[in-house]
Amino acid sequence: MRIHPMIVILACLPACGADQALSVNGITTRTVSVRVGQDLDLTLQTIGPGQYVSPPSVSSGSLRFLDAAFVGPFVPAGPTQRFRFKADAPGQAVITFSHTGQNPVVQDTVNVH
């Protein structure tokens, strides 16, 4: 049975709405864009002892920190942390993640439109 490509596209449209959280994993120092009202999930992997400090520093009111949690899969290298944010107003915010151990500081830029 062959599925027409337009059916696949239409089936994916509901997932692209404003309520859909943008999730970004594992890449340090990135720039992402979200819409006002959209959630943003950033996941960081620690290598070695320590963890990223919660709450991280957020440079503007365009983005609001919601919460942080340790998430799986759990690996021997160190904890994986998910940080959740809500885009509140148009603008740009720089999120700075500091680590309690030897992992580098991570800075992510978020453009809210």
Image (cartoon, rainbow, N blue to C red):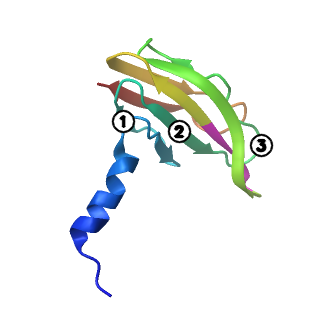
User: Disc 2 vs disc 1: which is toward the camera?
Assistant: 2
Q: Is residue 112 visible?
A: yes
- In percent of the image, x 48 and y 44: which residue is there? 23
Which numbered disc, 3 or 1, marks the residue that appears first in the sequence?
1
Q: CA distance from mark 2 to mark 1?
A: 11 Å
State the SS at label 1: strand
Label annotation for residue 49:
3
Q: Is residue 64 above or below residue 3?
A: above
Spatial CA span between label 3 and label 2: 20 Å
Can you say which quadrant of the picture contains the N terminus?
bottom left
Counting from the top left corner in percent of width and height, residue 35 is at 34, 29
Q: Which residue is mark 2?
A: 42
Look at label 2 and name its amino acid.
Leu
Q: Amino acid at mark 1?
A: Thr
Q: Which residues are magenta?
A: 77-82
Contact between marks 3 and 1 (CB within 8 A): the answer is no
Q: Are marks 2 and 1 in contact (CB under 8 Å)?
A: no
Could you tell me how far apart the alpha carbons at marks 3 and 1 are, in whole angstroms? Answer: 27 Å
Residue to which mark 1 is pinned? 31
- In which quarter of the view is residue 7 placed? bottom left
